[in-house]
Image (tube, helix red, strand yellow):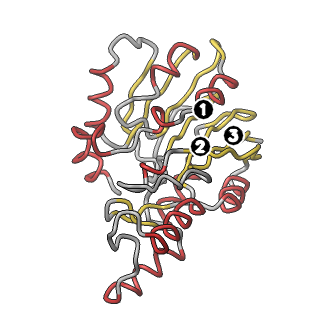
Amino acid sequence: MDRKYWEKIAPEYNEEIFDVLKNDSKGLIVSAIRSTASPNKTAIDIGCAIGKWLPVLSPIFKKVHAVDISAENLEIAKKLYPQLRNVEYDRIDMSDPKAKMPLCDVGVCINAILTDSLKKRNVFFTNLKKCIKKNGHLILVIPSLESSMLTSIIRMRWNPDKDANGVIKKNKSSFQLKNILQGNAEIDNVPTKHYLKEELQLLLGKEGFKTGDFQKIEYNWNTEFLNPPKWLTEPKPWDWMVMAKKL
């Protein structure tokens, strides 16, 4: 997932990319954002894409920096929300070690650290530290590797969609195994990084963040299968959300 990928997908973003805001039925992410908000604080939406979280952030912060790797995404966001006068848009590659970014009180990063490149992810996490003030907060939502594995187990055992997705193929077994061991699970045939809860604790702690409670952002099983059986209710698939404080 590089800049070319996001520039290409930008015009069809609503159709192609899962809407976390719409599917967070309990409103846990919005509640976490509001708990850190103040009319005297600045916020940064890291990987803002086409700006779905900007109407949440803009009214409750003094200023919002919307940053994304895709210039096309940012242009779409500007056109969608011209009424949000306190939003500043900047194209920033968070996987660039030389990236320059604003220093803010609160950072919101919703499913943006997805690259299968370990090198790029390491830089991304370091840059998270650089853009959050001391004692500031980071609200991070990330794909759950535990949830992805649960989905794979259900697919292998009950095969709700009667297909072979998620099955290790002989001619690709070495490549797929290497990806699995790194936490890279395929979404629409694109290797996408998923995270263990304990892995996130280590990564954020290494960058000087103290992690609070982890919460599951739960979704319905129709986000994973075309035809989930009626008995498949609990547990639900989920992303991890954590609020971390920069020490």
Q: Is mark 2 on a helix, strand or loop?
A: strand
At label 2, which amino acid type do we have?
Ile
On the image, which quarter does residue 34 sit in? top right
Residue 87: tell me if it is visible.
yes
Mark with earlier residue (1, 3)? 1
Q: Which residue is drawn at 32% across and 70% down?
A: 163
Q: Is mark 3 on a helix, strand or loop?
A: strand
Q: Residue at x 46, y 14 (%)?
A: 86
Crowd tier of the residue under label 3, counting other residues whose Cα lies within 10 Å: few below 14, some 14–19, many 20 or above? many
Quarter of the picture holding the C terminus: top right
The residue pinned by badge 3 equals 243
The residue pinned by badge 1 equals 26
Crowd tier of the residue under label 1, counting other residues whose Cα lies within 10 Å: few below 14, some 14–19, many 20 or above? few
The reply to whether the C-beta atoms of the residues labelled 1 and 2 are less than 8 Å apart is yes
The residue pinned by badge 2 equals 217
Q: Is residue 239 left or right of residue 21?
A: right
